[in-house]
Each structure stands twice: as C-alpha cells, then as structure tokens.
Image (spheres, rainbow, N blue to C red):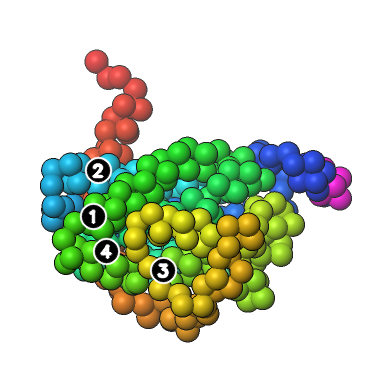
Amino acid sequence: HDADAQRAFDDLIANERRIEPRDWMPEAYRKTLIRQISQHAHSEIIGMQPEGNWITRAPSLKRKAILIAKVQDEAGHGLYLYSAAQTLGITRDEMTDQLIDGRARYSSIFNYPTPTWADMGAIGWLVDGAAICNQVPLCRASYGPYARAMVRICKEESFHQRQGFEILLALMQGSPEQRVMAQDAVDRWYWPSLAMFGPPDDQSPNSAQSMAWKIKRFSNDELRRRFVGMLVPQAEALGVTLPDPDLRYDADQGVTAMGEIDWDDFFAVLRGDGPCNAERIQRRRTAHEEGAWVREAAAAYAAKQAAPRTE
Ligand code: 3HC
C-alpha cells in the first residue's frame, strides 16, 4: 500500500500538483513542512517586536497609523501560517511552547535592535523586500495550505515594502541629519537582510530535499543575488549607498560580484547569541502569560456555548 501511495505522491509532485492535508505524504515531507511553516509563523510574530517598538514613537499620526497596520498584518501572517502548520498535525500550543522554550527557530533578522526611526524604513524596504523575494516562489510550494497562505501574505508584504521605501525617501529628501540617519540604518540592516535567505548553498542541508519536494523553488544564494539585483536601482533612486564595496552590477547580467556575508554573526544569532534574542523570547513569554486570561475566558465561553440548554 505505501509503495502505491509513495508513487501517487511522487506523481503529484512531478506533475506540479498540490499536496493537500488529507493526501498521503512521506513522514519526512510532513516533518520538514512543520519545521519550515512553524518557523515562518514564529518569524512573523517575533517580527512584530522590533517595529512595535516605534508605534508610540512614530514622528506623525500618519506614520503611526501605517506602522500599526503593518504590525497588525504581521500578526495576521503568523495566524495564517500557524493554521497552515496545524493542518499537518501539530497544535498551536505545541508550537507556542517550542518558541517560548527557545526550542524553535525564527528568522535571524529580528534579533537586531531598532535604535532610530529610520530603522522602520530600512526594515520595510530591506527585510520585507527580502521576505517578498523569498515568499513569491513559496506561492508555488507543493503543499496547498502553505502556498495559499503565501498568496495573501505576498499581497500585504508589497504594501510593507513600499511604505519602508517611502520612509527612507522622505528622510533622504530631508535634513542632513535625516540623511545620515537613513544611511546608518541601511548600513546596519543590509547584510543581516541578505543572511535572511539562509546559509550559502554549500552549507544548506535542507535545500536539496526541499527543492526535490518543490517546497523551495530557488536556492538560498540564487534568491539572495536576485534580491540584491532588485535593490541596486532602488538604492540609486533613494540616494543611499549599499554598504558593499565589492558589489558589481550591470543592467543586463544583474549582480556579477558581491562581498562576503559575516556568517559567524549569522550562526551566532542562530545559536541565540544575537543582540536581541533573549529580549525577544522574554517578551513573547510575557505576552503569552499575560494573555492566559483571554484564552481561559474564550474557552469558558466556548464551553458554555457548547453545553446543552438547561432552561
Ligand atoms: N533565520 C533563522 N534560521 C535560519 C535562517 C534564518 N534566516 N536561514 C536558515 N536557517 C536555519 C534553517 O531553519 C535550518 O535549520 P533547521 O534545519 O534547524 O530548521 C538551517 O538554518 C539550515 O538552513 P537551510 O538553508 O538548510 O534551511 P531551509 O531549507 O529551511 O532554508 C529558509 C531556510 C530559506 C529560511 C527557508 O526555511 C524558508 O524559505 N522559510 C520560509 C521563509 C521565512 O521563514 N521567512 C521569514 C522571513 S521574516 C518574515 O517573513 C516576516 C516579514 O513579513 C517581515
């Protein structure tokens, strides 16, 4: 039976068809999807913290309203992705516990501080820009619920990237101090946003299998290079300098050379030794504990609704 099921699964993948929750799937396929989708969901939720830091400090009501909308979107992205992961047999509580106990990964990029308002621009332009580069191909991932979640997320991500670009543009057209602040934020966020795409292809143990299963469509290095190619003309439009003196780009071939990423810093962040790892997890743990009463109230209400009427 399993041999037939495996053949049917392989045919679906080979024919670019979607695998749905009720379809038979290899345990390893299920496991790697739970790994990637739960980490993706954790990234969205933890990603609310660096930006949330500036909601009360935004320079105008307009910026505050846009930032609140963006942070709220990230919570929604987390919800879609946790729900997609739950179709594979893991519960929301298990995933939350894994994150709070420090057993789950989330994107390295959210372990850096956001000391100035320009960071809101750099995060929107660079981090959400990188996320779009990585997430558009995931709209074609072989697992149905993940691919469908990505379609909705990518639409909202484009707004996130645009508002970040616009924040930096406003600063670059402002005072000399604002220009310095914008360039400083780009200098601090450029390399970590390239590392978001994952380790170099020759140090990416999951890529080969993930590409065979058509979860990952392009390699880490390929998407990274594509992302930098998108940034070059946008950096020129902004008037900011990308902090890579070895970067070579031409309009036809795109990026032809790039400097080296500091992989020691990346792997230190993955080990939990980044500037903000402890703070991010502590914040998430506190939010979970302080939210216990909401979960209890919702459960009590649901139980009351489900109980047979007595009158
Ligand atoms: N941060 C943390 N861990 C990372 C990482 C990163 N940027 N890049 C790689 N890793 C981890 C992997 O999870 C893997 O560890 P694991 O086996 O314990 O899970 C290890 O490093 C080796 O990496 P691989 O390349 O072999 O792993 P993958 O094939 O899973 O590729 C990935 C990594 C490209 C991040 C892939 O998992 C992926 O595409 N994930 C979905 C995209 C995602 O998570 N995006 C988060 C961006 S933030 C965001 O979306 C919020 C935005 O809206 C602001």
| 1 over 228 or under it: above or below | above
Q: Position of residue 113 (x, y in %)?
A: 27, 70
Q: Which mark is residue 182?
A: 4
The residue stretch that appears in magenta: 3-8
Asked if residue 5 is among those painted magenta in the image, a careful observer would answer yes
Q: Which mark is residue 66?
A: 2
Residue holding disc 3: 242
Find residue 237 and report its horizontal and vertical position in percent.
38, 54
* Badge 1 element: loop
Residue 299, numbered circle: none
User: Of label 4 and label 1, which has the lower sequence position?
Assistant: 1
Closest to the camera, between mark 3 and mark 2, is 3
| Left or right position of 50 against 259 | left
Q: Earlier in the sequence, mark 3 or mark 2?
A: 2
Q: Secondary structure at mark 4?
A: helix
Q: Point out the residue furthest to the top here.
A: 311
From the viewer's perspective, is residue 306 above or below residue 263? Answer: above
Say which label, 1 or 2, has the lower sequence index: 2
Tell me whether circle 4 and circle 2 mark residues in contact (CB < 8 Å). Answer: no
